[in-house]
Amino acid sequence: MAHRFALALALVAGCSSNAFATPPAKTDVKLVSIGESHSFVSDALGEERTINVYLPPNYSDPNRKFPVLYVVDGGLDQDFMHVVGTSHLGSIWARSQEVIVVGIATKDRRKELTAPTGNPELLKEFPQAGYSGFFLKHLAEEVKPFIARSFRVNGQDAIIGESLAGMFVVEAYLRQPNLFDAYAAISPSLWWDDQRLAKQAEGLMKTRKKGTDPRLYLSIANEGGDMQHGMDRVVRALHGRKNWCYTPRKAMRHDTIYHQSMALVLQYLFPTDTPVAPESGFKIRCDKKG
């Protein structure tokens, strides 16, 4: 089941400066389409799920194909809209490519974005936790094939997430590196389960053949504690590998880093060949990189 979501835009011609003090007798209203929502029953999750799809302006050209950005926590009331807006602006500036944005809505983040745990304290507080493998299967076997057969994609894609969704992206990078061409995790919640995933990172990277790493962007706000310790473990596990960038943002907080970093992240994930002036501020600076 699919439907379009839109904004109502009132177009009023010849209004004076006090037009809104006395409403005009008549306005012309047009619907501005932002994208599409698709709902279907997921076999992997056993319930109805929703994905939101934004198509870039030049998608109207039937001869063009586009890369895809998958956004975890991509509901209309989650991160879909701000990612779409930043993507649109990035393509206007030629800072990043035009992309199809696919928002994968989550319902219970503690359930869907966390790996199984034997921690009794976590299980007591979050007994539903541990379904990240099923959510990843939902992406791999249901969402990606649907997008591939429904839209003009060029075979290039990336996934992004923040906080618990960021930890989910790190898990996907470590366990299924061939699923996406690029991964981006912003302030991932690597504190979860006593940093269990972060502690597994070195072993998981050692089992991967060198020269097969997809691109990875990591960033973290001024988090401290187990959040930072978990990130440090993952960064150490990446030493000697290629195609990764780590950019800590100590001037930002957990609730501000995602929005403020998005333009830079999109530039890393989907770079363009357009040269930019140094004063533009578009240069990507990695604290540590491969």
Image (cartoon, rainbow, N blue to C red):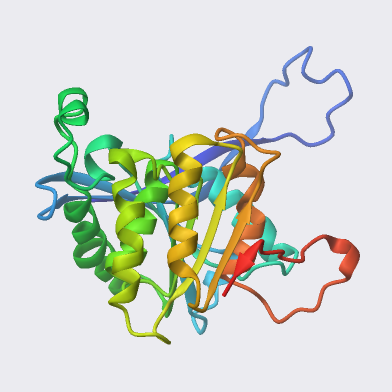
Residue for point 66% across, 61% down: 287
Q: Residue furthest top?
A: 21
Query: Image height check: is 98 above or below 251?
Result: below
Residue for point 35% across, 71% down: 205
Q: Residue furthest bottom?
A: 211
Q: 188 or 201: nearer the eye? A: 201
Q: 266 or 132: nearer the eye? A: 132
Position of 69 with respect to 95 (left or right) is: left
Residue 244: % across, % down: 53, 70
Q: Which quadrant holds the C terminus?
A: bottom right
Residue 136: % across, % down: 24, 58
Count of numbered circles on the image: 0
Position of 152 with respect to 33 (left or right) is: left
Q: 110 or 147: nearer the eye? A: 110
Query: Image height check: is 253 above or below 134?
Result: above
Position of 238 with respect to 285 (left or right) is: left
Residue 24: % across, % down: 73, 21
* Quadrant of the image occupied by residue 265: bottom right
Residue for point 44% across, 38% down: 226
**Residue 206 is at least partly visible in this image:** yes
Residue for point 66% across, 30% down: 27
